[in-house]
Image (cartoon, helix red, strand yellow):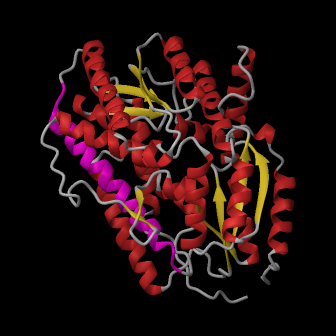
Amino acid sequence: MRAKYATKPFQLWQKAKEMRLQNYRNIMHAKEEGRLLFTGQRGAPTEILAGFGDFEFLGMNDYAASVAYDRPMALESFETIEAKGYARDLCAYWRCYMGSLLTRRFYFGGPFPSIDIVFTQNACDTNGKCQKLIAEQLGIPCIMVDIPVIGDHSKRLAAHYVDYVTVQFNEAIERICRVSGRMYDDEKLIQAIYNRCRSEVLWSQIMMLNQTIPAVMDMKSQYSMFVPLVMARHKEETVKFYEALKEEVEERVARGIAAVGEERCRLLHYGAPPWHSLRLFRLPQAYGAVFIGSQFSMMSFGAFEIKPDGRLGPKLTPQEQGVDLKNRDAALRFFAAWYLDRAASGWCGTQPRIDSQVHLVKEWHGDAVVFHLDRGCENNTSGLLETKVAVAESTGVPTMVYEGNRGDSRDWSEAETMDRLEAFLESLGLKKLED
């Protein structure tokens, strides 16, 4: 069957892979090259670490996703953790990471790196405790920024919330100075915040371009393209990468280049993927359907806001807002508000998740939503069925749920999930395309 739209590989695909591997090489050699090596939950406000000069950060989430992709290594990690008495229903990312640490096997080769400090945020019940266990295992300091529980999402930027986080940023800097013996450079902090904001806004602008029909980037491609943003959004090279990617995506839109040449149905996903079984997201292509993205891949690492017309759009960078970060106090307070607004405020609570998913369906022209009932993260799964019902009622689009685990393939039946997804696609009136 002849494709409706032209397709071609992304020119920057290889560059994204190279940046990912270089980041892990930097982590592996941080100690011998005199850089501080931190670890912690990936949502940590790592930009405040830039004031200590060149540093590396081994993010639990992205590293654990790599371990989860390697089923034998993940299984070894889980069995090691369980032998220590830890439960199977703990965070799957943490079990992948901690199991790798305990076996001293690093996914990218060699022994597990020697960490200096655990630096993390506490945004759900397991975040803080699990990171403290890592610090205790390694015998190193654990420095944590607590994220306030915001019952009313509309009040997430109330002054007392911003004050609470700003004070903790200052305390974290002071404590790291004491335990590391290093001086702090406010100018490097300010530049890191500018870079992070610019990187996240660029990603949001790129994702806005995916509203076009046909979609120019499918979700599986997003998993590769957002890696530099996840791992090093504070770096100038990351800004340059997303400036180039935006240009490439704009060109693809102008030329009608599609992610899937036979696109006739646009699917949205909810939640992190089962990293051990990513081929699930290729299956719909046989029916002319494409996963155009998810809240996880499109919004979690971008910077969106509600525009005057009620639709989502990219936030303005500090420079576009006319904000001049002249000193540490101004920079930390601005960053605390930015961090609460786009990174932390939607982490807990069903209503923000419903709202974001409804925006995605309506504004990205979604035809159906597939929800991952993820046993690997109780927080992300909390309220998922209520979200499913609310999204269906608000948008009128069909929805389905599959059960799985982002990291542990033992909580996963690939055959059953594939069958369920195929049945769902057929219920949408789709048939397999002719070869």
Can residue 282 be seen?
A: no
On screen, residue 278 above or below 89 = below
Residue displayed at 55% across by 16% down: 133
Q: Residue at x 78, y 60 (%)?
A: 400
Percent coordinates x, y for residue 290 in the rendering: 65, 71
Q: Quadrant of the N terminus?
A: bottom right
The relative height of residue 435 versus residue 286 in the rendered view (above or below) is: below
- 408 vs 90: above or below: below
Q: Quadrant of the C terminus?
A: bottom right
Relative to residue 429, is residue 403 depicted above or below?
above
Viewer-proximal residue, 22 or 286? 286
Residue found at the far left of this picture: 326
User: Does the magenta stretch mainly form a helix, a strand or a loop?
Assistant: helix
Q: Position of residue 240 (x, y in %)?
A: 29, 58
Residue 301 visible here: yes
In the displayed structure image, the side of residue 308 where residue 334 appears, left or right = left
Instruction: From the top left corner, tell me how far across and down residue 425 is, in percent.
Output: 80, 71
Residues in magenta, as a range: 184-212
